[in-house]
Image (cartoon, rainbow, N blue to C red):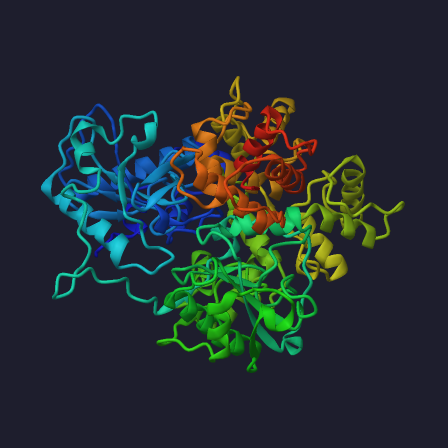
Amino acid sequence: MRIEKRSTWAQRIWIENDILLRTGKTNQWFIDYYGEPPRASSRDWRPWEGGVFIHYIGSFLSFSPDNEEECQTKIADIWKSHTLFQDVGDIEYNFLVCPHGTVYEGRGYERGEANGGASIQVGNPTVGYRFVGRNTGFYSIQGMLAKNDAPTSAMLTSMRELIYHLRYELGSTRRAGPYLLPHSAGGWDTECPGERLSPYAKNGSDIDPEAPRDSGGRPVPPRPDPVLRIIPREGWGARAPRDVARVPASERTGFVVHYSAANPDQTVRAIQNYHMDSNGWWDIGYNFLVDRAGRLYEGRGWQNEGAHTKGYNRTHIAVCFIGEDGDATAAAKRAIRSLYEATNDRIGKTLSTTYHSALGSTACPGNDLRAWVRAGMPTDGLAEVDWGAGTPGLTRSVASQQQAVNSLGHTPELVVDGIFGPKTEAGVKWLQGKVGVDADGIWGPLTEAAYRAYIGVGNSTNGLTSIRTVASQQSAVNRLGYTPELAVDGIFGPRTEAGVKWLQGRVGVAADGLWGPDTERAYADRTGDTAYSDGGLTTIRPVTYQQSAVNRLGYTPELAVDGIFGPRTEAGVKWLQGRVGVAADGLWGPDTDAAYAHFSDGARLTVDGEFGPRTVMATQQAIGVSADGIWGTESKRGLQRHLNTWADAGLVVDGDIGTATVKAMQQHLNRMTGAGLTIDGGWGAGTTEALQRALNRGKF
């Protein structure tokens, strides 16, 4: 499949002088920076659950380009509208197909933001129903057509070939799901993709490709991934850890297999929420996780102490299969075995293999995985594991480091091959000298923060700025001798703000109370410390992003997106925080960022105390039954099973929602969200409101 890279249309970017003056950048900077390969999103991305949404340009003026240069100029204009005027940080579409049939890369195989947010119900009575985030689970393909333009045969052919490529030719972490939908699907308030293109935006149409078949006419199963890419924490929408504890490789002796004993469609984020909110742990307990398709997810990674097996959290690396006994597929087992071999390579020695119930009194990981581990974890072949994610201390992949070095003008350019050899190390040291950090060749948090500050992305409309967690800032203030010492509680109140300003004065930067890259560098210069000493890195969004996010959730009157954090913006952020279910302190930290991301991609339930169809469907999704909106016996049994698994309720699974089941649910809601419900066994409006808030936050 030929796809024209971003650099082809980025050459057509043209920025007005007032914007160049305001940003302090040249037009060539925009061409170079946005002509680079797509950057990974910091949001959850699971395209295998959904599929593809079809879009169009939608203008009243016909788009009838005479040549490819006109198509490329149009894409550059779309990019400018999205990036500079709609505050989304980049072009929103994954791919664009012009009337000549040329396919252009937008965000490519990374998550896009064109599909409108929220979630949509997919499925059928045979396979069941579920909610999938419109951007979380779907690629976006724009047909470059105006309202009244008819799609050309070349465009339709290329769309069909592109959808085939996304469904059947990619690895499991990037493969598109089976659904083909118009942007307007699910009642979304838009005419897109218009009368001319909508008939094609559905399963069974001329652009919906058939699955590949063998000589006997049977569907060909997906090929096993030759390389298993570990989905990084940002790829599944992880919350920031409250703390970390490093473990040297010399202490590692074993590799232990677990299972989640629950719905195999459960998200990694839901497991993390349970571990942090119900169990009170720092983070998700496992080092890695694997799903039925053999996709690997980064949990605590290779270098951190886990919370998975009492007495063995430092000595053993734990991998958890997401599912119940008997759910583990050949692909899942292949991924676990491949991860084990990669772990041995990473640690530098052969670890023993075991399972949870061999080290403690538990049924985990079930009979099937237990027997498999005892048999030596046999598999039909192994896969290479991409260490780009799951490599502790690595802020960005090696390929991304190489691209960053090249973007700053290193000569000769590095080959972007993902291999960290002497030339790449020298290039990273060169970059570090250019951005003003110690040239040690290790791309850690200080290098990341300094690089982002140098190129200005930390101040862009959608940029993330690396800072310390509040608890880490409090520890740093205390370390320099502040009296009386701050309570290290992670709450940024007036005393913490005063302490940070005091520290900034000590280290010689502007005392504004905001711990950004300048403060981090100055503190590191003074102490020799880095954020990785206690794992306290987090992110904060620029003010323009916060203002746009508040507006996107329906705040009235809308905030001016001017980048000024005044009383109205603070009030808007507090309103948003209340809407997404976190403490309304007006500070956009990691908890707010993660909660907003989950809420904006989720069901967005109205908290009204009504257990109506949409709340029923969201509850069904959370407990692992078909989300059909009918609260019948199977759903009630599913609720009881869910509470038995995640709240240790000990309920009889009989479908009778009596006092005992409701009390267990109320206790679970209190533990997970601090709902403050009275445990009375009565399912009234207050309990439903607490349930709706928990579902919006992904904490049920």
- In the picture, measured across the screen, residue 598 lies left or right of residue 493, that is left
Q: Nearer the viewer, residue 552 or 102?
A: 552
Q: Nearer the viewer, residue 697 or 25?
A: 697
Is the N terminus in the top left, top right, bottom left or bottom right quadrant? bottom left
Position of residue 314 relative to residue 519, above or below, is below
- In the picture, measured across the screen, residue 433 lies left or right of residue 486, that is left
State the residue at coordinates (16%, 36%).
65
Q: Is residue 454 visible?
A: no
| Residue at the extreme right of the image, as rendered | 484
| Residue at the extreme bottom of the image, as rendered | 349
Q: Percent position (x, y) of residue 393?
A: 59, 63
Q: Percent position (x, y) of residue 402?
A: 45, 63
Asked where in the image residue 148 lies, by quadrant, the reply is top left
Q: Percent position (x, y) of residue 226?
A: 34, 70
- In the picture, measured across the screen, residue 523 lies left or right of residue 11, that is right
State the residue at coordinates (22%, 53%).
164
State the residue at coordinates (73%, 48%).
471
Q: Percent position (x, y) of residue 676?
A: 70, 33
| Residue at the extreme top of the image, as rendered | 557
